[in-house]
Amino acid sequence: MPNETILAANHNVVIQGVSESTLTLNVDGEVREIHHQLAELKGLLQTLKVQNVQYADKIYNIEHIDEANFGFVTGKKAFNELLTKQLIEAIQPCSLPAQRFLERVAAIPGWENQLHISDKAKEIIAYSFVGVIGIQISKLMAIGKEDFSEAKQRKYIEKCIQIAKWSLDLVCFTLLSKLWDAQNQQARAFSEAQQTVLARRFDDTLEPSVEEQFRLLQVLLEIFSDKANALAFPMPELEGFSPNLVEGSAFHQVCQALQALNEKLDKSQYDLLDCFGAETQLAAFFGYFHFLVNYRMASIKHIGYRHIRNADARYLHHYAALGIDSKANVDAEKVNYTPQTVDTDAVLLYRGDNYAEHINLFPFVIDYNALTLEQGSKVCFYSCKEFSDGSIEYLFLEDNSTIDINRKGLLKPDADFNELMMSKDNQKILNLDSVVDQFREARRCLLGDEPNFDDL
C-alpha cells in the first residue's frame, strides 16, 4: 500500500506498514512500532501537535479518522465490506438464501473480509433486491473491486447516493401511482402544504435532492396514514413508517448525510473517507428500506391474443423480468400464456412471483425500449420537467443519461387510428405521446389543473 505522511510544522511521520496488530512508523527518521494502532497513533500525534494526515495526494484532519474508518484509510478494510455484511443481515428475515448463507458463515469470524465468501453474499444481495435496485447494487459492488484511483472514489460515492435516491423514487412513485388510482375512484382533498409538495414533484425543472425526496415521502405517508382518506398502503411495510420521517429522526439524519455527500461531490471536495461515509450511510439507509427485497418488477413488452373455436381465450404476455435473477440473468425475457390480461407498455411492481396483482408505475417509470419497439429493456425514472417547453425528462438508470419526451400530438380528432397504426414510426410516436398524456392526467387528477408553459 502507498505510504501515508503525517505532517506537522517540525515533525515528519510516515506510516511504513500495517499488519493485523502493528503499525510501523518512521518518525523523523526513527522507526517505531505502535501496537494499539489508532489510539496510540492519535496520542503520538497529539504530543507532536500534528493536525493533518496526508494520504497520497489528499490531506485529512486526524480528528476525522476514527476506529470505524481507520481500517478503510490504511487499506485493511476493503470497499463494500461493511455494506455487504449489513445488507445480508438486514434482508435475512425476507430472504431464504440470505438466511442460509448466514447460517453457514456463523462460525467464520470476519467472513466479510474473505473475498470468495463475501462475493457469494454480494450475489445474493443483488438478486434479492427489487428489479433495477438490485442491478445498481451489483454495479456498486463492481466499482468497489476496481483498482484504487481518484475516478473510483467519485464513482463509488456517486453510486451510493444514486441507489438511495432511486430507492426513494421507487417508493414515492409507488405511492403516487396508487394515490392516482384512488383519486380516480373518489376525490380526496389535500391540504395546501401537501398540494405544494406534490405539485413540486410534478413541475420542478431540476432533479429533486435527497432532502426533497424525503419531504415528498413524508407528505405521501401523511396522506395514506390519514384515516379520513381510507387508503390502503400499497407497500404494507410502510404502515407505521411515519415516525422515521419526523424532523431529526435517525432516518432523516441518514438522508441529510447523503445530501451533504452529494454537495461535496458537486464541488469535487470529497476524499477517501467520504467513500467510507457513503457506504456507511447507504448501509444505514437500507436498514429502513430492506423491505424492497419483497418486490419484483416486470416490463410488459407485448400482449398477443389467441382464441380457438370452442376453447377459452388466452393471452400471451411477452415481458422482461427486470433485475438480476439467481442464475445471473439480467432483465430476462419471458412469456406467460394466461387467460388474464394486463396493462400494456407498463412497468409493474409486485410482491412474490406473480405479477397478476401489481402496481402500474407508468408513466413515472417507463421502459423506453418497449415504447419505441426496440429489443431489450431501457428502464427510466421520471426526473423533472424541461423548463423551456414543458417536455418530460427521464433518467436512464443504466448510465445516468437523460431522455426528453415531448408530445407531438399525432392523434388528431379526425385522424384514422387504424391507418396511423399501420406505421411503426407512428406507433412509437403514439406510445411516447401517451407518456406525456398520462403524466398530465396524473397531475390533473391529483392536483386539479395543468400548468401553462405557453409564455416561456
Image: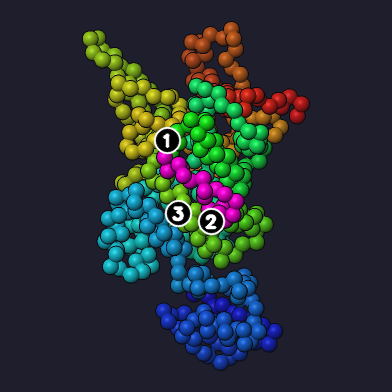
Task: Return the residue at label 1.
Answer: 349
Q: Residues within 10 Å of mark 2 (few under 14, many from 20)?
A: some
Q: What distance separates the C-alpha of mark 2 from that of mark 1?
A: 28 Å
Closer to the chain start, of discs 3 and 1, is 3
User: Which one is closest to the eye, mark 3 or mark 1?
Assistant: 3
User: Regarding mark 3 in the picture, which secondary structure is present there?
Assistant: helix
Amino acid type of disc 1?
Leu
Residue 111, position in %: x, y? 34, 66
Pick the quarter of the image with the C terminus: top right
Q: Are marks 3 and 2 in contact (CB under 8 Å)?
A: no
User: Regarding mark 2 in the picture, which secondary structure is present there?
Assistant: helix
User: Regarding mark 1 in the picture, which secondary structure is present there?
Assistant: strand
Judge whether 411 appears above or below 189 on screen: above
Q: What distance separates the C-alpha of mark 3 from that of mark 1?
A: 21 Å
Closer to the chain start, of discs 2 and 1, is 2
- Which region shows up in magenta? 236-254
Residue 371, position in %: x, y? 49, 27
Q: Residue at x 24, y 9 (%)?
A: 309
